[in-house]
Image (tube, rainbow, N blue to C red):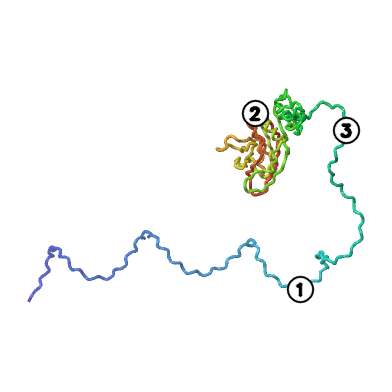
Amino acid sequence: MLVMGEAGVDGTPGTPGRDGSKGDKGSRGVDGQPGTPGKNGTQGEKGDIGEPGYPGQRGNDGSKGEQGEKGEPGLSGLPGTKGDKGIQGDGGTPGPPGQLGDKGEKGAVGTPGAEGDIGKTGPKGDTGSIGPTGPIGLEGTCTCPKVNTDQNNGNGNADSAAPTTYIGKAERACKFIEGADSIDEDRQLSQDGTINTAFTARCRGRKTCLKPEVEKFNITYIKRTPFMLSYRFDYRYKIEKEALLSLQSVSTSAVQHIRIKCLNAYVYSDGDDHKSRSISFVTWNDVMLRSHSTEDNPHYVYTVNKDGCKDSSRDWKVTEFALESDKPERLPVTDIYVRDVRGEKQHLFIELGELCFD
């Protein structure tokens, strides 16, 4: 028979055993405590549009708006009832003339008419008999026939040429008159001392000054291209051409003054002081005087004493020109070239001043 003894004293711990094989999966443990909040994540993409919400409750009435624009005309109304008869209107205008009636019977002879106008002057009558010799006249001009000394056969008879009237001593220009510097009056001058080349001039000291045939004339135009005044500009002065040429030949300078009144027209500078539309003057010897020097026209320039026409859009203004030259054969001017053309009504009123030679 086996007898069990008492338990012995615990032995010393043995060495650790080797790791055992992996055990089966244990059952789910109890939930742990909530962790601390994590950091905000990045913004997600925009979600889809949600379904429309339910209509809200009706709001309070708004304030009264401003009056709207006038609406379109409404449809025509129904025709009204026939009105009462109106009062009688005024008489109508006379109708057209009726057809030509039949020719009437010949009328009775009328009463004599009024006395007619005086008839035209009849032809010149025969030369009358020579009258008695008159009294001796005062000393003056004389008419002296030219005598043909070559073919008069020694009989001294005058030929058939027209007689020449001499006016006595007459200078060709004022500066040749004795004491000319103190003269200020009209004088009769002549190229050769005959009536044929005689003319009246104003002697202003040594200057010989001529008056124009026509002092003032008006020009109204509607143009789109520049033009010459031509026949509308009467440049003549009170002197014959032959006498004028003589006066030019004995002079060393000349000056001519011209005033131009303007309405809605430029003749020198425009409102911006540009001179592209300024007028030009054609001289006696066919030179063009301009407002400014150009490459092909460097010397022939006129001067202006006053330029009011640059402000002539609504009121009449005046521009004053001084045409001076040390070549007297250039004056007077014979035509004016107009450049300011706008296709509308424009006005120029030209006043010719004295033409003086020295």
Q: Residues within 10 Å of mark 3 (few under 14, many from 20)?
A: few
Marks 3 and 1, Cα distance to the nearest angstrom?
106 Å
Locate the N terminus and report the quarter of the image it occupies: bottom left
Q: Residue at horizontal 92%, vertical 59%? A: 109
Residue lying at 46% horizontally and 68% vertically, measured from the top left: 50
Q: Residue at x 34, y 62 (%)?
A: 35
Could you say whether the residue bearing mark 3 is in a helix, strand or loop?
Answer: loop
* Disc 2/disc 3 C-alpha distance (Å): 52 Å
Verify CB contact (< 8 Å) between mark 2 and mark 3: no
- Amino acid on which the number 3 mark rests in the picture: Gly
338 lies left or right of 110: left
Whether tag 1 and tag 2 are in contact, CB under 8 A, the answer is no
| Closer to us: 245 or 304 | 245
Q: Nearer the viewer, residue 140 or 283?
A: 140
Tell me residue 177's x, y (percent).
72, 25
Reading the image, the residue beneath label 2 is: 252
Against 106, is 332 above or below?
A: above
Residue 337 lies, in percent from the top left, at 64, 42
| Residue 125 x, y percent position in the rendering | 85, 41
In which quadrant of the rendered view does residue 292 lie?
A: top right
Q: Amino acid at mark 1?
A: Thr
What residue would you read off at disc 3? 131
Identity, as a three-letter code, of the amino acid under mark 2: Thr
- Identify the residue at image location x=71%, y=73%: 78
Q: Quadrant of residue 235?
A: top right
Q: Secondary structure at mark 1?
A: loop
